[in-house]
Image: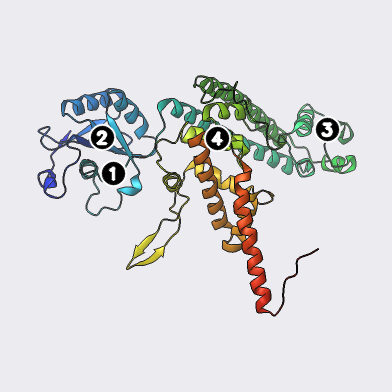
């Protein structure tokens, strides 16, 4: 299908063309619209299907039109096959955030959308989203798939708890984890036909804190065949998901092993962990994730308070092995959406809130910031001070911003985290607190006397 352009002849009169060979693509589920400069073809806008054969035909048409740079919106997951096929043809593809080109009045059709993208790209008004190299994207797809498997797995744990509640078996309220060693042993015994609470309580692991009397009371219930059937299937699905997670972990580890190391492990071995291994790591990858991330990133991010091996993994999969695309740590924090987005009019700041976004690494940093609530480190003290001064949400964002800047410096320089660099800042803060106390005491007619 061919569509003619009506505005192409007047575009060159508006702004200077920077990219003369630019094209724009509007993406849909079943069709795409491509706009090229008006002097490259009799019809500057064409519609193509989204079958693989159609996408290759579109790439050949773009080549025949002399286009070398293409702008497209990141629409759901529909852009991924188009991006990958066009990339194999050697095009420079700019993946545009849809928020940057929306709400343009009068441009609501597919034809006008692709023309508008082509024009904005040709005059240099579009900036591309960060997308890691293809090898990193492979790992990212696997990790996101693993995250979805975990989400589905948790829903079936809830189904198990629902079936137990319907039979008035309160065991999941007595032991902390119904899918732990004790919980699974009791569930298997129940599904095998055991109903005697005294025999079931004998399966208790020594780490369970609840006493036998309480557990026996929790195991007296109203067993019904329909609920037992639901419990059986929910447990089977839960275990099947864990089997899929194990296979996914093997594939992820295989992909990570294919990457070259960023550091000489013989000269700079992995530093010892800063804390004892955490309990409840059953949902984490079943391999040495911390060692892999140290090898691939070149620095041990887990030495930073609040940063776990999973957080380092998210950094690797969402950003890559280096930060070359971010000239400064301010650019990095801005891309994460962790710095103020000022809106100024008439010389006044109307708003300085951070812009909305779903950056996965920024979310991971916010979770890391929340974990510093009880930390006795400098970062923990910083979080508590920000919380007392600005409230919880702003404190989380401010601490995540500080963590992002620290990570940027470590990855850029390849150095290891050194807590002593915060000693100077801590001394400055302590002197400021003392000065404030002295001024307040002086105002009230008192004098501070140091303790002997």
Q: Which residue occupies 48% across, 50% down?
A: 338
Front position in the image: 86 or 266: 266
Question: Residue under circle 3?
Answer: 205
Question: Residue under circle 1?
Answer: 126
Q: Nearer the viewer, mark 2 or mark 3?
A: 2
Marks 4 and 2 in Cβ contact (< 8 Å): no
Comes first in the chain, label 4 or label 2: 2
Q: CA distance from mark 4 to mark 2?
A: 38 Å
Image check: 248 left or right of 176? left
- In the rendered view, would you say 273 is above or below 248? below
Image check: 350 left or right of 292? left
* Mark 3 crowdedness (10 Å alpha carbons): few <14, some 14-19, many ≥20: few
Question: Residue under circle 2?
Answer: 70
Quadrant of the snapshot with the N terminus: top left
Q: Nearer the viewer, mark 1 or mark 3?
A: 1
Q: Is residue 51 visible?
A: no
Quadrant of the snapshot with the C terminus: bottom right
**x and y percent of residue 268 in the render?**
60, 26
| Local SS, label 2 | strand
Marks 3 and 4 in Cβ contact (< 8 Å): no
Comes first in the chain, label 2 or label 3: 2
Question: Residue under circle 4?
Answer: 415
**x and y percent of residue 140 in the render?**
48, 31
Q: Nearer the viewer, mark 4 or mark 2?
A: 4
Comes first in the chain, label 3 or label 4: 3
Image check: 62 left or right of 440? left
Comes first in the chain, label 4 or label 1: 1
Q: CA distance from mark 1 to mark 3?
A: 60 Å
Q: CA distance from mark 4 to mark 1?
A: 35 Å
**x and y percent of residue 405 in the render?**
50, 45
């Amino acid at each position: 299908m061919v569509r003619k352009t009506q505005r192409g002849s007047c575009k060159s009169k508006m702004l200077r063309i920077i990219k003369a060979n630019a094209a724009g693509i509007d993406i849909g589920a079943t069709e795409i619209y491509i706009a090229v400069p008006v002097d490259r073809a009799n019809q500057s806008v064409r519609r193509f299907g989204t079958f693989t054969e159609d996408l290759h035909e579109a790439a050949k048409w773009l080549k025949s039109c002399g286009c070398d740079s293409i702008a497209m919106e990141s629409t759901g997951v529909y852009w991924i096959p188009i991006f990958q096929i066009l990339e194999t043809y050697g095009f420079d593809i700019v993946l545009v955030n849809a928020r940057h080109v929306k709400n343009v009045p009068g441009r609501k059709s597919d034809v006008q959308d692709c023309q508008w993208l082509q024009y904005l790209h040709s005059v240099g008004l579009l900036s591309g989203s960060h997308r890691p190299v293809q090898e990193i994207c492979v790992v990212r797809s696997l990790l996101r798939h693993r995250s979805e498997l975990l989400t589905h797995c948790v829903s079936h744990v809830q189904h198990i708890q629902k079936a137990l509640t319907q039979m008035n078996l309160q065991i999941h309220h007595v032991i902390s984890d119904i899918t732990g060693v004790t919980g699974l042993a009791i569930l298997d015994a129940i599904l095998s036909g055991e109903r005697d609470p005294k025999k079931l309580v004998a399966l208790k692991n020594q780490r369970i804190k609840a006493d036998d009397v309480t557990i026996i009371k929790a195991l007296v219930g109203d067993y019904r065949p329909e609920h037992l059937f639901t419990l059986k299937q929910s447990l089977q699905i839960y275990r099947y998901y864990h089997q899929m997670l194990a296979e996914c972990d093997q594939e992820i580890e295989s992909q990570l092993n294919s990457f070259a190391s960023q550091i000489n492990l013989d000269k700079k071995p992995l530093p010892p962990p800063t804390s004892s291994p955490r309990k409840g790591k059953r949902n984490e990858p079943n391999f040495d994730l911390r060692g892999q991330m140290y090898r691939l990133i070149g620095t041990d991010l887990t030495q930073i308070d609040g940063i776990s091996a999973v957080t380092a993994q998210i950094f690797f999969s969402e950003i890559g092995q280096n930060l070359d695309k971010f000239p400064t740590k301010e650019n990095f924090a801005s891309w994460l959406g962790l710095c103020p987005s000022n809106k100024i009019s008439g010389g006044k700041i109307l708003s300085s809130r951070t812009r909305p976004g779903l950056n996965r690494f920024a979310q991971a940093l916010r979770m890391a910031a929340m974990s510093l609530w009880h930390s006795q480190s400098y970062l923990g003290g910083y979080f508590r001070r920000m919380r007392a001064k600005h409230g919880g949400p702003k404190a989380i964002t401010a601490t995540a911003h500080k963590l992002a800047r620290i990570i940027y410096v470590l990855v850029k320089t390849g150095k290891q985290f050194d807590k002593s660099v915060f000693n100077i800042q801590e001394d400055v803060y302590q002197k400021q607190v003392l000065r404030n106390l002295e001024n307040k005491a002086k105002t009230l007619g008192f004098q501070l006397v140091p303790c002997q």
